[in-house]
């Protein structure tokens, strides 16, 4: 009879292989993606939904910084108001600027796969960015742009009240954890407390794409996401 330890090892292997499959490594695992499991939280009340809509409308009309001049449209963020899990990236790229939705380009497709590997539906979490308008040539947002834009994100977070925020890459991580020094390899892999929310910093999906063959980075991201899943009772 297999031991409990063997069961645990097999379960760990299975989730890792599932992740590799989800993020596009086709040659290791032939099983279908895991079914998304429903998020069990009370729906947000009508007042909270109305406040989210109000923030969204302000963002759509915002002209507080120079990024407004270069955008096609702003990208407020999307997903459930009542969710334990948020993902925060840096800022919209070209595809997001054109569609008005966060993480819909190549990096976004990878993020969607990561979310699926975590057994969430993309629509069950909330996805947002530090700045809501595309910086020219996808440059890193400037401090003044971050300062004028992040009150919107903070209002969204206050309304959602998530248990966990996954910060994708340096810009998002620095906003929440300015005092945490070091590169992503040394910062990631653990939770940091921020205003009662657990922050899990990890690599930006664009970095995974730029280092496509690097299994070590992929494994680090999956380890981080497994910690998030454990905290949220998904595994
Ligand atoms: N990169 C980001 O940081 N955010 C997006 O929405 C898309 C790409």
Image: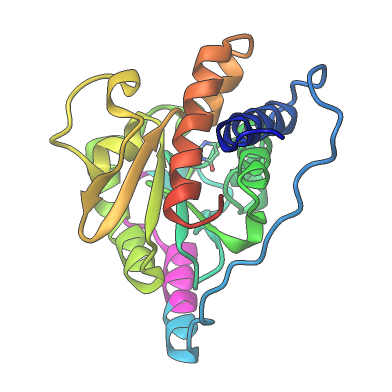
Look at the picture and state if 153 lies above or below 67. below
Locate the N terminus by quadrant. top right
Of residues 56 and 202, the one drawn nearer to the viewer in this rendering: 202
Residue 179: percent from the left, percent from the top? 13, 35
Residue 65: tell me if it is visible. Answer: no
Residue range of the region highlighted in magenta in the rendering: 52-66
Tell me: residue 90, above or below residue 194. above
Residue 72: give x, y in percent of width and height. Answer: 58, 48
Location of residue 150 in the rendering, given as x and y in whole percent from the top left corner? 30, 54
Which residue corresponds to the image point at 58% horizontal and 35% vertical from the top-left? 8
Residue 28 in sight here: yes
In the displayed orientation, state which residue is furthest to the front: 1
Q: Nearer the viewer, residue 21 or 59?
A: 21
Q: Nearer the viewer, residue 114 or 136?
A: 114
Who is closer to the viewer here, 131 or 166?
166
Q: Where is residue 16 shown, x and y percent of the image? A: 63, 29
Residue reaching furthest to the bottom: 46
Q: Quadrant of residue 209?
A: top right
* Magenta stretch: includes residue 170: no
The residue located at (78%, 19%) in the rendering is 28
144 to the left or right of 28 = left
Q: Outermost residue, left direction? A: 179
Q: Is residue 59 magenta?
A: yes
In the image, taking residue 151 as reference, residue 60 lies left or right, namely right
Please give the name of the residue rendered at 51% of the width and 13% of the height, measured from the top-left corner. 216
Question: At x 49% / y 67%, what residue is drawn?
Answer: 83
Kindly report the secondary structure that dominates the magenta region of the rendered protein: helix
Please state if 17 lies on the left or on the right of 162 as rendered.
right
Q: Is residue 98 left or right of residue 231?
A: right
């Amino acid at each position: 009879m297999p031991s409990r330890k063997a069961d645990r090892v097999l379960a760990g292997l299975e989730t890792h292989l599932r992740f590799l499959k989800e993020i596009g490594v086709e040659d290791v695992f032939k099983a279908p993606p895991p079914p998304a499991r429903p998020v069990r939280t009370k729906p947000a009340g009508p007042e909270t939904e109305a406040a989210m809509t109000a923030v969204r409308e302000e963002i759509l009309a915002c002209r507080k910084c120079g990024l407004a001049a270069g955008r096609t449209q702003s990208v407020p963020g999307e997903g459930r108001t009542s969710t334990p899990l948020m993902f925060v990236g840096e800022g919209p790229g070209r595809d997001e600027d054109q569609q008005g939705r966060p993480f819909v380009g190549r990096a976004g497709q990878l993020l969607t796969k990561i979310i699926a590997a975590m057994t969430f539906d993309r629509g069950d979490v909330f996805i947002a960015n530090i700045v809501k308008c595309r910086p020219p040539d996808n440059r890193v947002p400037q401090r003044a742009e971050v300062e004028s834009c992040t009150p919107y994100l903070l209002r969204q977070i206050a309304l959602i009240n998530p248990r966990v925020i996954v910060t994708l890459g340096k810009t998002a991580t620095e906003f929440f954890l300015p005092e945490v020094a070091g590169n992503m390899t040394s910062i990631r892999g653990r939770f940091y407390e921020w205003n009662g929310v657990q922050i899990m910093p990890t690599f930006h999906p664009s970095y995974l794409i730029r280092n496509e063959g690097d299994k070590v980075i992929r494994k680090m991201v999956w380890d981080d996401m497994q910690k998030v899943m454990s905290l949220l009772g998904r595994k």
